[in-house]
Amino acid sequence: MISDLFGVSGRDMLDALATGKHDPRMLADLARTSMRGKTALLVEALTGFFTAHHGELLAMMLANIDRLTECQPPLRATT
């Protein structure tokens, strides 16, 4: 379905979930390029139980990923 969860489409969907958007159709509409042809499958996959608490946890995890990603270039320069 989504080969790279942290690619542009996947990240857009995760960001939307983290900010309280839970409509599966709206989330599926964030798909780009080759994923656009999988809208029906995305709607099915994005249908489920996701609370505000899940969104808060997701937002914290995404913030950590962003923070660690920012550390990569300086760390690579020292090796």
Image (cartoon, helix red, strand yellow):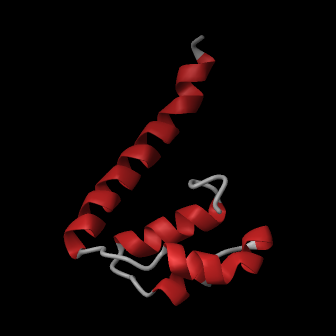
Location of residue 68 by image quarter: top left
Q: Residue 73, percent across and down?
A: 59, 30
> From what the image shows, is residue 25 above or below residue 13?
below
Q: Quadrant of the N terminus?
A: bottom right
In the displayed structure image, the side of residue 79 where residue 51 appears, left or right: left
Q: Residue 5, percent across and down?
A: 57, 55
In the displayed structure image, the side of residue 15 where residue 52 appears, left or right: left
In the displayed structure image, the side of residue 53 where residue 14 appears, left or right: right
Q: Is residue 55 visible?
A: yes
> From what the image shows, is residue 65 above or below residue 24?
above
Q: Residue at x 43, y 87 (%)?
A: 23
- Of 32 and 2, the residue lying toward us: 2
Q: Quadrant of the C terminus?
A: top right
Q: Residue furthest left?
A: 53
Q: Residue at x 79, y 71 (%)?
A: 33
Location of residue 53 by image quarter: bottom left
Q: Residue 41, percent across and down?
A: 62, 77
Q: Residue at x 26, y 65 (%)?
A: 54
Location of residue 60 by image quarter: bottom left
